[in-house]
Image (cartoon, rainbow, N blue to C red):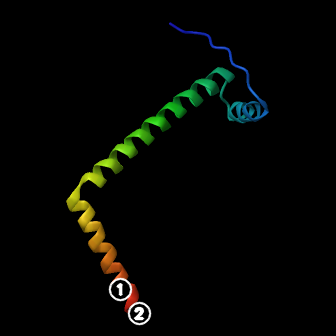
């Protein structure tokens, strides 16, 4: 089942839509693709945030990062 959606677009969105249409997409395809791409980007952001939180909670990983940072600093200082 399909649902029709009506939106008002400003000049920036109109130019972006024209760019997508110039790539060969129909207006409907361009709009659907943009919505799906935006949703996928949000999911990727959520996944990345969860990975960062998991790394921050991993005490062994945090200790290893600190050790590597200290090693790198000592190598830089010895130049």
Q: Quadrant of residue 15?
A: top right
The residue sitting at 33% across, 48% down in the picture is: 53
| Number of other residues with Cα within 10 Å of mark 1, as a class: few under 14, some 14 to 19, many 20 or more | few
Query: What percent of the width, then of the height, locates residue 56?
Result: 30, 54
Helix or strand or loop: what does disc 1 sit on?
A: helix
User: How many badges with numbers are in the image?
Assistant: 2
Reply above or below: 20 against 5.
Answer: below
* In the displayed structure image, the side of residue 69 where residue 13 appears, left or right: right
Disc 1 to disc 2, C-alpha distance = 7 Å
Q: Position of residue 19 (x, y in %)?
A: 72, 36
Q: Residue furthest bottom?
A: 79
Q: Are marks 1 and 2 in contact (CB under 8 Å)?
A: yes
Residue marked by disc 2: 79
Q: Quadrant of the C terminus?
A: bottom left
Q: Which mark is residue 54?
A: none
Q: Residue at x 37, y 41 (%)?
A: 47
Task: Bin the neighbour count of mark 2 within 10 Å (Cα to Cα): few under 14, some 14-19, many 20 and up.
Answer: few
Residue ranking furthest to the top: 1
Q: Residue furthest left?
A: 60
State the image coordinates of residue 68 (x, y, percent, origin top left): 30, 73
Residue visible at 64% across and 20% down in the picture? 28
For residue 3, which quarter of the picture?
top right
**Camera-nearest residue between 3 and 63:** 63
Give the residue number, with chain letter if any, for mark 1. 75
Q: Is residue 41 left or right of residue 12?
A: left
Element under disc 2: loop
Residue at x 47%, y 34% (from the top left corner) = 40
Above/below status of 8 relative to 47: above
Q: Say if 52 sits above or below 37 in the image.
A: below
């Amino acid at each position: 089942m399909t649902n029709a959606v009506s939106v008002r677009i400003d000049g920036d969105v109109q130019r972006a839509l024209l760019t997508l249409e110039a790539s060969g997409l129909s207006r409907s395809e361009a709009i659907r693709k943009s919505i799906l791409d935006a949703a996928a980007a949000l999911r990727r952001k959520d996944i990345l945030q969860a990975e960062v939180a998991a790394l921050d909670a991993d005490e062994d990983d945090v200790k290893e990062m600190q050790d590597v940072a200290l090693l790198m600093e000592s190598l830089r200082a010895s130049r």
